Amino acid sequence: MPETLNLFLIDLTYVKPVEEIDPLLDAHYAFLDRQYADGIFLASGPKVPRTGGAIIARGTDRAALEEILTQDPFFQAKVAEYTVTEFIPKRHAVSLQEALTATD
């Protein structure tokens, strides 16, 4: 894995009821799809129980990632809060290395 590549855990916590979240889901999914297409997001999904979601992202610049998150309809509608944790992967599954290399 490249030493300059950091991974990010993005924890979304809903701050509004799911009745306000659900109408935004299609737009949120479109946002996620753009980030997958750009090779930024690696995995995402809802928390269990459904109190928010989680995203695993890749990158070298936390500020750029935080700017990307401002494009999420959940962020724009102020229905979720985000906690971003950056980490440097020192150990990983071979399949993760292959996935990261394939998107470079």
Image (cartoon, rainbow, N blue to C red):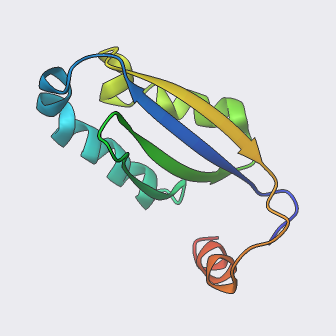
Point out the image quarter for the N terminus. Answer: bottom right
Q: Position of residue 6 (x, y in %)?
A: 76, 53
Q: Residue furthest front?
A: 49
Residue 93 location in percent, x, y? 69, 80
- Residue lying at 64% horizontally and 70% vertically, measured from the top left: 104
Left or right placement of residue 42 versus residue 45 in this view: right
**Can you say whether 78 is above or below 45 in the image?**
above
Q: Is residue 101 left or right of residue 2?
A: left
Q: Which residue does the image show at 67% across and 77% down from the upper left? A: 101
Give the mark count.
0
Residue 31 position by quadrant: top left
Residue 96 shown left or right of residue 54 in the figure: right
Q: Is residue 64 above or below residue 54?
A: above
Q: Residue at x 19, y 27 (%)?
A: 18
What percent of the width, then of the height, locates residue 86? 73, 42
- Which sits in the foreground, 70 or 86? 86
User: Compared with residue 38, is residue 24 higher up or lower down, i.e. above or below?
Assistant: above
Q: Is residue 64 above or below residue 7?
A: above
- Which residue shows up at 42% across the image and 28% down it? 13
What is the quadrant of residue 10 in the picture? top right
